Image: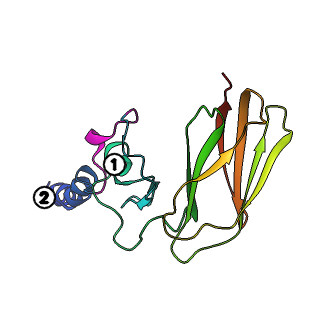
Amino acid sequence: MIRALLLLLSCIPLFAHAQFNDCVDSNRINPYYQCNDPTFDPVCGCNNVTYRNGCEMTNRGGVNYPSADQNGVCRNDFFFYHFYPNPVVDRMNFSLQFASQEVAPATMQIYDIYGNAVYFQLLNSFSDFPTTPQSIFFTNLETGVYVMVIQARGIFKISKFIKQTF
């Protein structure tokens, strides 16, 4: 009986740690929260996930504080990008940032729903600190759904967007 009690008491710290994770507060997570701050200032959360800015880290991710040893983009993400608006009317504002001390040439490729490449751009003016958004004009694209592929040093990230004309 005493052995069972000692075994149970030795497991309490494990359960307590699982209940009181101070990095992410699940009560604060709201995937529908709209951060009205359009600033592109990537933050690496204590959960090693990169967020667009501190507002998204706190309100959408529920993360209580940024990572102590990483600034900006998390090293495991290598790079992080953000674009707006979606749907695109005539131009897209595009921002990209690399992780600290990681800079490489990147490419942007855009494909239509049939898999045809309709746009290509070399992205070589980005660094490991936040930059102002670059405007990319898509006046020649037809209305439809497109897939954007960003590639740098063998790492691919994919997003969809809608091109809309009035």
- Kind of residue indicated by mark 1: Cys
Quadrant housing residue 144 = top right
Query: Which residue is pictured at 31% across the width and 49% down the height?
Result: 58
Mark 2 surroundings: few (<14), some (14-19) or many (≥20) residues within 10 A: few
Query: Which residue is pictured at 41% across the width and 70% down the height?
Result: 71
Q: Is residue 59 above or below residue 1?
A: above
Quadrant housing residue 141 = top right
Q: Which residues are magenta?
A: 23-32
Residue 74 part of the magenta segment = no
Quadrant housing residue 126 = bottom right
Residue 12 is marked as none
Query: Which residue is pictured at 66% across the width and 31% down the height?
Result: 162
User: Where's residue 165, x and y in %?
Assistant: 68, 25
User: Which residue was labeled with disc 1?
Assistant: 55
Q: Nearer the viewer, mark 2 or mark 1?
A: 1
User: Where's residue 74, x and y in %?
Assistant: 48, 65
| Residue at disc 1, secondary structure | helix
User: Where's residue 57, x and y in %?
Assistant: 36, 51
Mark 1 surroundings: few (<14), some (14-19) or many (≥20) residues within 10 A: many
Q: Nearer the viewer, residue 5 or 71?
A: 71
Q: Are marks 2 and 1 in contact (CB under 8 Å)?
A: no
Q: Give the dominant element type of the magenta stretch: helix, strand or loop.
A: loop
Residue 30 part of the magenta segment = yes
User: Which residue was labeled with disc 2?
Assistant: 2
- Kind of residue indicated by mark 2: Ile
Q: In which quadrant will I find the N terminus? A: bottom left
Query: Which residue is pictured at 26% across the width and 58% down the height?
Result: 14
Q: Nearer the viewer, residue 154 or 164?
A: 164
Q: Is residue 127 left or right of residue 147?
A: left
